[in-house]
Amino acid sequence: MSTSEQEIRTDADSEPNFSIFAKVMMSFAFIGLLLVFTLMKLPQAKITSLIQSVVQSSLDPYGIYISDHGRELSIWKGFQYRLIQPTLELPDMTHIELEEIVVSPKFSALLSGKAGAAVSITQVIEKSPAKTELAKINLDGMIRGDLIDANVSIDSLDIGKFGILTFAAGLKGAGTLNGNIHIEGHLADLPSLTGNVNLKLSKVRIEEGKVFFLTIPEILISEGTVDAQIANGKVLIKQFQIGKPADDITLAVTGDLALNKNINSTSLNLRSVIGFSDKVKQKMSMLEAIMSEGKQADGRFVYKLTGTLQSRMAIPDPQK
């Protein structure tokens, strides 16, 4: 087999996680219904207990346990349910400490026969006598059956403190994430979905650690941009750029994903260009050897990503 035809198959046994935000949003929307139908019949302690069981059951499939320092149910602030200083415990025993989670049902959605909720999550980034800096995630959406219309806004989220690095790759570090996500359509029919993803990364620092069998050094990335559009059964990558030339890693991705009703069968049509700093190359010489077939004249590595999400293939595609 020639080097241009060599195919590197990635792990096909791991099933991609379905959107955790969508599933959690369904549970929080149900909380709105719970408040309407039980508020006048049950004491507050029982209502908060019922709501808490719904929240926990939405996290159970991911092996996440939630605890808190107090719960409040406010009737006069628009039926708000508030968790005070909740802590999420991930399967690897990592603890994510939050300032509060506030859930409010959307009564306008109920009037149209849908379940809806607004969820606000805040986390302390830095605290001093002079000021307290907070990261915020706001989820706002409506659901009827498998039909969803959801918006997520992210403001100054620390991807290290919020556990995104740990959840995605088992790594520790820091970095700031801002942006917006909008998804609309039928979850049971992924090609029907429309929406967009606009995210900005800045000041990313990944601590030395291990990914699979590779030991990675400390990695610094100054910025990143993800801009994707979901329409006509595809996720079109308008811009996916991580890092600048002076950073430890640069990654540019172009192409699209063709959605399928079965998410594992979603087709990949992507091209990635990856660059490493001299520091990373020295520390990860084995990685450079593994990827050598995709190396081009400027020292970067180019691969086409094809196949499906469940059975992915990386094909060297250097333009020497």
Image (cartoon, rainbow, N blue to C red):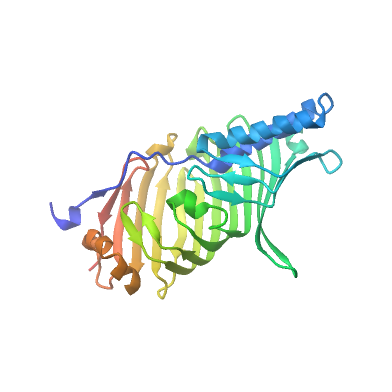
In the image shown, does 208 or 275 lie closer to the viewer?
A: 208
Q: Where residue 216 appears, x then y in whole percent?
A: 36, 62
Where residue 145 sits, quadrant-wise, is top right
Q: Please state if 85 lies on the left or on the right of 299 as rendered.
A: right
The number of numbered badges drawn on the structure is: 0
Which quadrant of the view contains residue 277? bottom left
Q: Is 72 on the left-hand or right-hand side of 61? A: right
Above or below residue 285? Residue 146 is above
Which residue, as the protein is rendered here, is positioned at the far bottom? Answer: 246
Which x, y percent locates residue 134?
A: 68, 60
| Residue 121 x/y as whole percent | 67, 50
Q: Residue at x 43, y 52 (%)?
A: 169
Q: Is residue 114 visible?
A: no
Residue at 25% across, 61% down? 286
* Quarter-of-image position of residue 319: bottom left
Q: Residue at x 51, y 38 (%)?
A: 62
Specify the farthest residue to the right.
76
Q: Is residue 38 left or right of residue 244?
A: right
Q: Is residue 56 above or below residue 244?
A: above
60 left or right, relative to 126: left
Q: Quadrant of the C terminus?
A: bottom left
Does residue 6 appear in this view? yes
User: For the view shown, which residue lies furthest in the top direction?
Assistant: 41
| Frontmost residue, 203 versus 252 | 203
> Residue 225 at x, y = what percent?
50, 63
